[in-house]
Image (tube, rainbow, N blue to C red):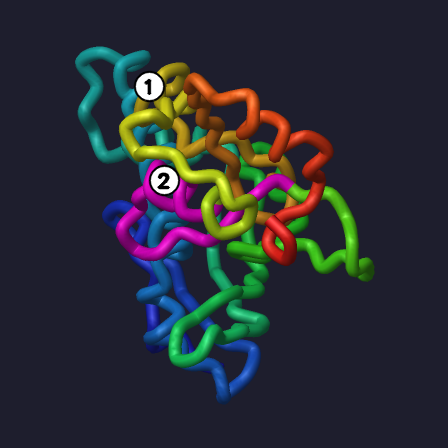
Amino acid sequence: MSFNVALRVGSRSIPLVAASDKINLQLVSEFKPLQDWAKTLAKEEAALDQTNTNAQPGDSSSSSSTENQSKIPLKVNKVEVRNVDYFGPKIGFVNLSVEAELTETGKKPPGFVFMQARLAIPSFAFPEIPAGMLDGSGDFVGKCAEELKEECGITLEHDKLIDMTRLVYGSDWKGVYPSAGGCDEFLRLFVSTRDMEWGELQALEGRIGGLRDH
């Protein structure tokens, strides 16, 4: 296990290590969800650092900078890649262990992270909201329309889908994190209104399944 790969978080580097020699750390370091995680962490730290700096007008010394760093509530020291699952040649899921400590107490919080995880339900029939995984384009509206058509047989034009998450949060948040304790999966909410014929409404009546029957 070595520290030859680093994860960039703002101006600093965090060691990225592997629990097994079979894990391709370079490929994992280029995994977009992991890069997004690092960028979000850097953004949070920068915002706190700026807040601390503004609270100390006229003091630009290095000691002040060090003090600001100490006021960041959580310090990430290392990221260990425990396991990687692939979808063909591409990474599907990454299981991480984040070594971090609370700056005020020095205690280490749980750091288990399962990126882009989906909960495996041991059932052949259960209710689920139509969902899918984004590619690198980040086209939420297009993916939403695609999944509705693929899983439910409902066709919606892209310009008829309104991104409610963006209306409320702008670019501040990607969405709502339902399982933030161990997963980076987030949900965005869209709404669409349309006029429908009576026959179309009847065709939707009682539909509780998706992909298999539409």
Report which residue position mark 1 lands on: 51
Q: Nearer the viewer, mark 2 or mark 1?
A: 2
Can you tell which quarter of the image residue 48 is in? top left
Secondary element at image label 2: helix
Q: Does the magenta run of residues contain 131? A: yes
Please state which of residues 156 and 92 is positioned toward the viewer in this rendering.
156
Residue appearing at x 37%, y 30% in the figure: 67
Residue appearing at x 77%, y 48% in the figure: 126
Examine the rendered structure and indicate whether residue 75 appears above or below residue 123: above
Residue appearing at x 52%, y 67% in the figure: 80
All told, the count of numbered labels is 2
How crowded is the residue under tag 1: few (<14 C-alpha within 10 Å), some, or many (20+)? few
Examine the rendered structure and indicate whether residue 112 appears above or below residue 50: below
Report which residue position mark 2 lands on: 140
What is the three-letter code of the residue carrying label 2?
Phe
Residue 38 locus on image (x, y percent): 37, 49
Secondary element at image label 1: helix
Q: Does the magenta run of residues contain 90? A: no
Residue 78 left/right relative to 51: right
Residue 90 locus on image (x, y percent): 39, 73
